[in-house]
């Protein structure tokens, strides 16, 4: 696994040994960042269930302003990858439980512009995180984008009050990306 482009282009990331991990494939990551395009520049990024920090570090390499990587199991590995990419000055790593960290972030209202959510498939984690962010007051900025990577057969989006799916892309028989934004913002922009 490597950083595709930007200041850390070509840098290989360390991966966990002996763990059953499923990092985002380079072709899916490239497609994701092609869709986001310039929306990455100067943005505050949150990467939850970050694993290696792959998505957050890619965003920082492409010009995001700052990033927070959250994963209980791989905090030390994410720190190492931030150093390898020379992006450590832009990164905060948190090694706590994702849902507890989201609760703390909601209280501090950081207003992230771009959120990546890429948990293990088929465990109900992305649905739970999506509902928690939907009910939050300040985790995601008003014009923010939340990208959820989930299994191709995981099509039951939970009932949401404030967030709305604005785009979905499928990649083979294994993966899909769903993009969410605040309903009020989308309706305002469409007027």
Image (cartoon, helix red, strand yellow):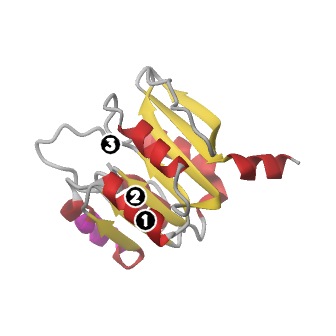
Dot 2 corresponds to which residue? 102
Task: Provide residue 56's location: percent of width, then percent of height.
Answer: 42, 59
Instruction: Label 2, secondary structure: give it.
Output: helix
Lateral position of residue 152 relative to residue 31, left or right: left
Which residue does the image show at 64% across and 40% down from the upper left?
A: 164
Which is in the foreground here, disc 2 or disc 3? 2
Residue toward you, 53 or 6: 53
Task: Provide residue 28's location: percent of width, then percent of height.
Answer: 47, 39
Task: Provide residue 89's location: percent of width, then percent of height.
Answer: 38, 79
Marker disc for residue 23 = 3
Marker disc for residue 77 = none
Lateral position of residue 143 relative to residue 169, left or right: right
Residue 100 painted magenta: no
Cα distance between the residues tagged 2 and 1: 5 Å
Residue toward you, 145 or 124: 124
Question: Cβ–Cβ below 8 Å for labels 2 and 1?
Answer: yes
Upstream in sequence: badge 2 or badge 3: 3
Lateral position of residue 103 relative to residue 180, left or right: left
Q: Residue furthest bottom?
A: 89
Q: Is residue 126 something that shows in the picture? A: yes
Instruction: Label 1, secondary structure: give it.
Output: helix
Upstream in sequence: badge 1 or badge 3: 3
Cα distance between the residues tagged 2 and 3: 22 Å
Marker disc for residue 105 = 1
Q: Over which residues does the magenta segment extend?
A: 79-87
Residue toward you, 108 or 60: 108
């Amino acid at each position: 696994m490597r950083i595709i482009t930007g200041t850390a282009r070509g840098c290989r990331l360390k991966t966990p040994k002996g763990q059953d991990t499923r990092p985002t494939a380079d072709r899916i990551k490239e497609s994701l960042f092609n869709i986001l395009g310039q929306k990455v520049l100067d943005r505050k990024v949150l990467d939850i269930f970050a694993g290696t920090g792959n998505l957050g570090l890619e965003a920082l390499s492409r010009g995001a302003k700052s990033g927070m990587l959250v994963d209980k199991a791989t905090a030390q590995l994410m720190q190492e990858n931030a150093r390898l990419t020379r992006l450590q000055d832009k990164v905060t790593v948190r090694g706590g439980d994702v849902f507890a960290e989201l609760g703390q972030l909601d209280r501090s209202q950081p207003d992230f512009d771009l959120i990546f959510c890429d948990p293990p498939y088929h465990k109900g984690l992305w649905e739970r995180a999506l509902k928690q962010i939907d009910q939050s007051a300040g985790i995601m900025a008003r014009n923010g984008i939340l990208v959820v990577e989930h299994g191709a057969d995981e099509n039951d989006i939970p009932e949401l009050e404030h967030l709305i799916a604005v785009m979905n892309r499928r990649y083979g028989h294994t993966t899909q990306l769903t993009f969410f934004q605040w309903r009020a913002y989308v309706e305002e922009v469409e007027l």
